[in-house]
Amino acid sequence: MLDADSCYRALLTRDTRFDGRFFTAVTTTGIFCRPVCPARPPKREHCLFLPSAAAAQAAGFRPCLRCRPEAAPGIALWRGTGNTVARALRLIDEGALDGASVEALGDRLGVGGRHLRRLFNEHLGASPVMVAQTRRLLFAKSLIIETNLSMTDVALAAGFGSLRRFNTAMRQTWNRPPGELRRGTVGGGSAGLTLKLPFQPPLDWALMLDWLKMRAIPGVECVEGSSYRRTIALDGRHGVVEIRAVPGEAALAATIRFPLMAALGQIAARLKRQFDLDADSAAIDAQLAGDPLLAPLVAARPGLRVPGAWDPFELAIRAILGQQISVGAATQLAGRLVVEYGAPLVLDDGPAPLGLTHVFPDAERLLSVDPGRLRIPGARARTIAGLAAAYRDEPDLLQAVLPLEHTIRRLCMLPGIGPWTAQYIAMRALREPDAFPSGDLGLRQALAVDGVVPSIGELEALSQAWRPWRAYAALHLWHKRGMGGGG
């Protein structure tokens, strides 16, 4: 993964394909950079190539102020890591170590704290605590550069326990007070706070918007032009987010209206996961294109990502509503559910954008669903209530904290949830890249030859060549049949 000669060649050419895959620490300056840094490249003998920003900081290097390591795509946080590390990183990105111990994180993942530390050092060159600290520091730097939040609000949003601790950490990292990192007046104000969410190209934003538009829940989501908007709810408070592409940059712009500063990091992490921004599209496309069945599909849609979900519970309910009916019918049902059980949107900072009226109902509101009010079969209502009860009692049920096979078995134990629904939930809500609903008729029809549709077993056998990216293969096959595939 970190062949030094290859890394140095990428550094000399400022090859954007390697941005996020490694960081260069310069021994003569004590600074670490992205491979696309505009500064003069250092001599080869002065370079150390490290797998993550956390590893560079753990080794005592400071982030570069020119290339801004905090703006690098998140590939380095998962590329080549083991499944346990990848799942731990998702939880850390949402603040799992803000006030909790490594042992508690390990318990959620089914491993001991010592073993988790060993895995992190092996794959990332840094401990879980160092990764979490680096995440706080780099997110704080982004907020300073891209917003006009006060330093107190920046400290709170980045997960620091106090302003004093924040100031100390920032001085130690950048060798200057945090106020000196800000240059001029930047975004913010009554229209919301705008952050940039970087990704590694390519990303087919128009294709993703088309997919989401067909499935947008009335009152909760809205796709208009080149923007996606939705309502959000965290800790009993409501907000809205709007996502759009940044012209000329490998980034999405997220405008966030939410009253709690401490939730900004979690919101940004969720949005990155919803739009699959940490995926290495080039590497995924290259592997899938090696299969003759998928090669023309990959060539037609480079940069295809798996659209995720803002809230795993919302997506799981949406998947249940979509069982054995069309995408349009499921979308209408979801809108009816929101009207009957969702809470009206209440914003602290002014009127809501047109078309956004409700937040999606939480598990407590769906513990008892009246099939008559929704005009759905009683069995479907019982499945919704059963999932709501299971999620209330086991919040990690819809978190990718255990291996995919275990998660599928656990979901299939719930009444009314079969392999298709479980795999679809894993694919979009849990961000499992190898989830694959092989029982989906649309996937099988996409591979029909002379009218002969392969069996589920035959599709499973074909899909082995697509691992570990079968979720992306499924998206390509659904798009081949039109946007209506996939629930």
Image (spheres, rainbow, N blue to C red):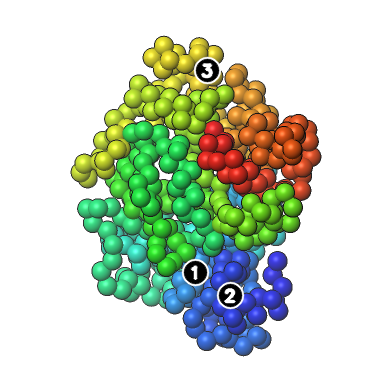
Is 56 located above or below residue 458 in the figure? below
Q: Is residue 389 visible?
A: no
Q: Image quarter for residue 151?
A: bottom left
* Label 3 or label 2, whichever comes before in sequence order: 2
In the drawing, what numbered circle is on residue 178?
A: none
Residue count near mark 1 (Cα–Cα under 10 Å), binned few <14, some 14–19, many ≥20: many
* Quadrant that contains the N terminus: bottom right
* Cα–Cα gap, marks 1 and 3: 48 Å
Nearest to the observer: residue 277 or residue 170: 277
Say which of 261 and 19 sits in front.
19
Q: x, y (%) of residue 67?
A: 47, 74
Of the residues shown, which amino acid type is indicated by label 3? Answer: Arg
Counting other residues with Cα less than 10 Å from the Cα at mark 3, is it few (<14), some (14-19), or many (20 or more)? some
Q: Which residue is drawn at 54% across and 80% down?
A: 30
Disc 1 residue type (three-letter): Pro
Query: In this view of the protein, can residue 42 be seen by the observer?
Result: yes
What SS does tag 2 mark?
Answer: loop
Which label lies toward us, 1 or 2? Answer: 2
Q: Tell me the distance, in whole angstroms, between the alpha carbons under discs 1 and 2.
A: 15 Å
Given residues 165 and 35, the one toward you in this image is: 35
Q: Nearer the viewer, mark 1 or mark 3?
A: 3
CA–CA distance in space, label 3 to label 2: 51 Å
Question: In the rendering, at what x and y percent does residue 485 appear?
Answer: 56, 36
Q: Which residue is drawn at 40% across and 34% down?
A: 217
What residue is shown with label 1?
69
Q: Which residue is drawn at 55% across and 51% down?
A: 305
Helix, strand or loop at mark 3: helix
Relative side of 480 to 199, left or right: right
Q: Name the residue under label 2.
A: 15
Taking the spot 57% from the left edge, 54% from the top edge, the residue there is: 301
Res. 380 mark: 3
- Examine the rendered structure and indicate whether residue 64 appears above or below residue 114: below
